[in-house]
Image (cartoon, grey):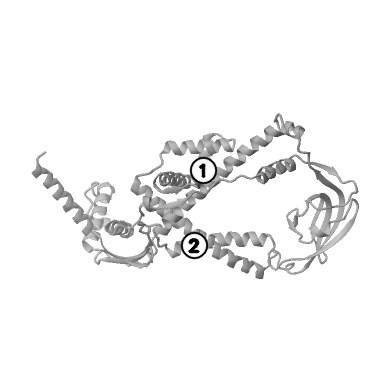
């Protein structure tokens, strides 16, 4: 192909692009960090073209008495379906104009547009104008990787870490045996019958309810005085406790009133821990205590090394974030914080926390959650920008391999795990995490990491 032909092709392409842009007009103004207000105008000419195309399509296919298909006068079609055509054209030009505005102003939205779409006035004889506000992905200035230096976090394993694992193994293999003197002590297990009443109304009655000291709950009911109240009690003993129900209690008539709990102790048992010796190791399928300790040491060391790597990775990302400040859309941050705070509120209410203490704890949570949420958003935007620049992506094959690994961990087939994740719309989140992992792997090779001498 000649140079002249190439020039003609480019010119034609530019002409087409200019023509396409002129169908929709828009102006964009940043009104807050990552928040853009777009003023959009759809010219009458564009609306007319849309109307003509829609009627032409309908006339081609719609039968009409007395006329061959494709030859029905437009005025008759307008009488029959004019209202529907107006609505369709209106919806179409609003949507297409918004898409064109995003493209023209190179905007990458991270939320649905906000605007009074129902209130947009539409007439086929006048330009259509409307405004929308949209949150967009922030601009990220990726710093020079080689200018970043971080100190590696060192993996540390102490004897107490090994001893702690062995102690947990002892507890896992402990036997529950009746207490010699029959008296309840710290960390014992009791079997209780109890009745909870509020005034003359029976709230709850249970037989053979297992209670593990020092829990404040028994069969889902919170009894803060139980851990102290049961100490020293033995088989056959009866005792009563009184608790004031919180103002947040589901039954408003009972909220704030006293709940009386009458207990009868059926039995008391105590965990008897095995001795740490070769026999204990053999029961865990090891030849000796020395071999058991060596295996545990290796496991703890690997876990410490993994934790050290993750901490070092976090320091790398934090160093990059410090070198590249990122403005965040406050609306998105507030929404994420609110979701977390509401989860905390529900959890605290389930624990029976009173309203005054609840609000105090929520205030503390709000401050902590903001810092965490902001870091998560900034980290996500930064790593995504790096992935785009470095052309880092995750293949479907890699996703399937990850799903298969997850399936093995849950004793499911890969197909079952795939269905489970798809139903809960979790695959996109997994892809995102995998992409971020790849970016961090790249950063480890680019950023200067100083090892301890």
Q: Is residue 399 above or below residue 376?
A: above
Q: Which residue is mark 2?
A: 335
Q: Is residue 409 above or below residue 247?
A: above
- In this view of the protein, can residue 391 be seen by the observer? yes
Q: Left or right: where does residue 184 sit relative to residue 11?
A: right
Of 262 and 410, nearer the camera is: 410
**Residue drawn at the location 59% of the way across and 41% of the way down:** 301
Of 379 and 167, nearer the camera is: 167
**Residue drawn at the location 45% of the way across and 57% of the way down:** 377
First in sequence: mark 2 vs mark 1:
2
Direction top: furthest residue: 287
State which quarter of the image contains the N terminus: top left
Q: Position of residue 23 (x, y in %)?
A: 23, 58
Q: Which residue is mark 1?
A: 421
The quadrant holding residue 40 is: bottom left
User: What is the spatial separation of the Cα atoms under label 2 and label 1, in whole angstroms?
Assistant: 25 Å
Q: Position of residue 244 (x, y in %)?
A: 76, 67
Q: How many marks?
A: 2
Q: Position of residue 214 (x, y in %)?
A: 77, 54
Of 379 and 423, nearer the camera is: 379
């Amino acid at each position: 192909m000649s140079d002249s032909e190439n020039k003609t092709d480019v010119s034609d392409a530019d002409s087409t692009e200019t023509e396409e842009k002129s169908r929709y007009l828009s102006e964009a103004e940043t009104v807050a960090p990552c928040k853009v207000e777009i003023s959009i105008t759809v010219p009458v000419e564009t609306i007319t073209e849309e109307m003509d195309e829609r009627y032409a399509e309908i006339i081609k296919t719609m039968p009409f008495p007395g006329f061959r298909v494709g030859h029905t006068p437009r005025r008759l079609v307008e009488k029959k379906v004019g209202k529907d055509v107006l609505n369709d054209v209106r919806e179409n030009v609003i949507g297409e104009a918004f898409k064109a505005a995003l493209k023209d102003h190179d905007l990458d939205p991270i939320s649905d547009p906000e605007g009074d779409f129902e209130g947009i006035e539409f007439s086929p004889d006048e330009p259509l104008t409307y405004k929308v506000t949209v949150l967009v992905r922030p601009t990220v200035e990726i710093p020079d990787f080689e200018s970043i230096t971080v100190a590696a976090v060192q993996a540390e394993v102490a004897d107490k870490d090994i001893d702690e694992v062995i102690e947990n193994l002892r507890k896992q293999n402990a036997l529950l045996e009746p207490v010699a003197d029959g008296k309840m002590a710290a960390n014992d297990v009791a079997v209780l019958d109890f009745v909870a009443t509020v005034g003359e109304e029976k709230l709850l009655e249970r037989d053979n309810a297992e209670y593990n000291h020092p829990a404040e709950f028994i069969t889902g009911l919170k009894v803060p005085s139980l851990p102290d109240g049961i100490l020293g009690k033995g088989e056959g003993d009866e005792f009563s406790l009184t608790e004031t129900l919180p103002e947040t209690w589901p039954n408003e008539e009972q909220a704030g009133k006293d709940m009386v709990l009458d207990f009868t102790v059926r039995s008391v048992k105590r965990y008897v821990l095995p001795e740490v010796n070769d026999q204990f190791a053999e029961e865990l399928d090891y030849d000796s205590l020395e071999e058991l300790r060596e295996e545990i040491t290796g496991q703890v060391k690997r876990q410490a090394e993994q934790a050290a790597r993750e901490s070092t990775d976090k320091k790398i990302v934090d160093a990059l974030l410090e070198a590249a400040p990122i403005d965040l859309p406050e609306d998105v941050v507030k929404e994420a914080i609110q979701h977390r705070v509401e989860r905390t509120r529900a959890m605290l209410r389930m624990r029976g926390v009173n309203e005054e203490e609840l609000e105090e704890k929520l205030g503390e949570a709000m401050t902590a959650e903001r810092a965490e949420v902001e870091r998560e958003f900034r980290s996500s935007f930064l790593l995504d920008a790096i992935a785009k620049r470095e052309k880092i992506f995750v293949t479907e094959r890699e996703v399937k391999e990850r799903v298969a690994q997850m399936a093995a961990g849950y004793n499911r087939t890969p197909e079952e795990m795939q269905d489970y994740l798809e139903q809960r719309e979790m695959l996109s989140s997994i892809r995102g995490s995998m992409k971020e992992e790849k970016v961090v792997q790249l950063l480890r090779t680019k950023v200067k990491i100083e090892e301890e001498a």
